[in-house]
Image (cartoon, rainbow, N blue to C red):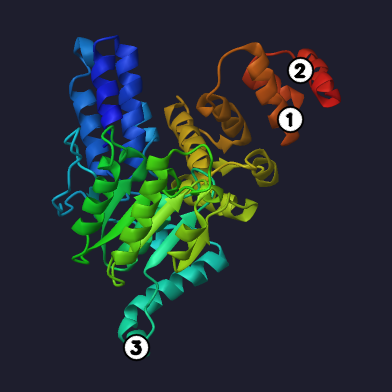
């Protein structure tokens, strides 16, 4: 848990209820990404039990909707004694006992073959080592935000029978000179037993190129410390890393990994399979124009697509007379999950992007409340620009 989040929550509590709930939401999103469902569920229970009190008479649906697509962690994970940061006394890592399997995921053929080989190498490690070859133990997942890098890493660890020592590298920075490098050494030392796979998330925050003129000397020394610790870690220790910004990584960092796996934005086939999987329980109630829906969801990450389908399901379940899940439900739900300021210009710009994905003026009028004539005029002006 990041110290900044804790401080934000405490400060928000003394401002107003809205600020407090926003801070709690940020915490839940951070913990959900790491698969700490037990922690998220406890927050849900606290808010539910306190709903009649002054401080917690707030609906907590957002807590459920921000959770992972699948249950990522078993509740009863055995905890490793985590090293602490010197100035904040907060834990530098968290232990996750993954519960998600690759059978729960939708993978491209290329990705599936790569991961299957990593698992096969682990099973036949003795054969490889007798030939003087180490099985793959250093894996880097890279790609856009929200496309499942963390989920992939946790599923891989489960397939290899490992609990995960999870570290957000962007939370390691200390105000004390040199303390960040010390934090890194503490983390690497704590996993040398081999029982845990080390998961380094937000990897670009520390592994940046050393030739970046905007980085100060201290940050460049941290990169060197990272490289040294990776080199000194026994070769049988599994290290999994994830980054949204692979272009920022130092070339020497790339050489420390046996394999780099691209996790791209989902294709139309992937999106359709994913939507069908989420709507499996309601398949008899679904009436969707899939070509239209797939065009409409083009460019969405898996995380955003999950939020969209969850919103559709909630809308369907809360209807007085539930009938069918239709394209109209998807189109109306995108407005609910979209996050931007409420200015008319922002709304029109957003609608313009949706028009490029095949939404009609009538559909855009319904979800934005802006007349078709106004939208048409503004779109023509934007096309010219």
Mark 3 or 1: in front is 3
**Residue 291 visible, this angle:** yes
Question: Left of 376 or right of it: where is 113?
Answer: left
Q: Position of residue 108 (x, y in %)?
A: 55, 62
Quadrant where the image shows the C terminus = top right
Q: Earlier in the sequence, mark 1 or mark 2?
A: 1
Mark 2 or 3: in front is 3
Of residue 381 and residue 253, the one placed in the foreground of this image is 253
Q: Residue furthest front?
A: 217
Q: Position of residue 197 (x, y in %)?
A: 28, 61
Q: Earlier in the sequence, mark 3 or mark 1?
A: 3
Q: Determine contact: label 1, label 2, CB under 8 Å.
A: yes
Question: Left of 108 or right of it: where is 25?
Answer: left
Q: How far, Cα to Cα, is label 3 from label 1?
A: 57 Å
Of residue 283 and residue 302, the one placed in the foreground of this image is 302
Check disc 1 and report the residue beneath it.
355
Q: Earlier in the sequence, mark 2 or mark 3?
A: 3
Q: Position of residue 291 (x, y in %)?
A: 69, 46
Quadrant where the image shows the N terminus = top left
Q: Residue at x 69, y 42 (%)?
A: 295
- Residue 238 in the image: above or below residue 364: below
Check disc 3 and report the residue beneath it.
127
| Element on which disc 2 rests | helix
Check disc 2 and report the residue beneath it.
375
Question: Left of 322 or right of it: where is 85?
Answer: left
Report which quarter residue 379 is drawn in.
top right
Q: What crowding class fits label 1: few (fewer than 14 Cα within 10 Å), some (14-19), or many (20 or more)? A: some
Of residue 257 and residue 208, the one placed in the foreground of this image is 208
């Amino acid at each position: 848990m990041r110290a900044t989040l804790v401080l934000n929550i405490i400060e928000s509590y003394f401002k107003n209820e809205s600020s407090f709930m926003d801070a709690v939401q940020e915490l839940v999103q951070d913990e959900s990404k790491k698969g700490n469902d037990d922690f998220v569920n406890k927050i849900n229970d606290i808010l539910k039990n306190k709903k009649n009190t002054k401080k917690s008479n707030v609906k907590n649906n957002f807590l459920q909707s921000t959770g992972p697509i699948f249950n990522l962690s078993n509740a009863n994970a055995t905890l490793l004694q985590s090293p602490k940061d010197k100035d904040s006394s907060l834990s530098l890592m968290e232990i996750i006992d993954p519960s998600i399997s690759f059978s729960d995921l939708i993978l491209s053929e290329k990705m599936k073959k790569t991961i299957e080989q990593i698992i096969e190498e682990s099973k036949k490690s003795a054969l490889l080592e007798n030939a003087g070859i180490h099985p793959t133990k250093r894996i880097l997942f890279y790609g856009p935000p929200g496309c499942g890098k963390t989920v992939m890493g946790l599923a891989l660890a489960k397939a290899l029978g490992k609990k995960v020592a999870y570290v957000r590298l962007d939370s390691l920075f200390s105000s004390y000179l040199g303390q960040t490098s010390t934090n890194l050494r503490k983390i690497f030392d704590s996993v040398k037993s081999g029982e845990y796979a080390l998961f380094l998330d937000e990897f670009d925050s520390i592994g940046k190129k050393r030739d970046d003129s905007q980085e100060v000397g201290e940050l460049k020394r941290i990169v060197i410390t990272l490289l040294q610790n990776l080199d000194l870690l026994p070769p049988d220790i599994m290290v999994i890393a994830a980054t949204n910004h692979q272009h920022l990584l130092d070339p020497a960092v790339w050489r420390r990994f046996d394999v780099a796996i691209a996790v791209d934005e989902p294709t139309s086939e992937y999106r359709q399979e994913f939507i069908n999987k989420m709507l499996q329980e309601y398949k008899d109630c679904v009436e969707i124009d899939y070509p239209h829906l797939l065009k409409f969801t083009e460019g969405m990450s898996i995380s955003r697509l999950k939020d969209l389908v969850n919103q559709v399901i909630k809308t369907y379940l809360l209807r007085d007379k539930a009938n069918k899940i239709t394209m109209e439900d998807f189109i109306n739900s995108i407005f609910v999950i979209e996050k931007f300021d409420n200015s008319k210009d922002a709304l029109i710009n957003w609608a313009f992007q949706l028009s490029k994905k095949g939404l009609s003026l009538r559909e855009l009028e319904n979800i934005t409340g802006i007349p078709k004539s106004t939208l048409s005029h503004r779109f023509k002006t934007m096309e010219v620009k």
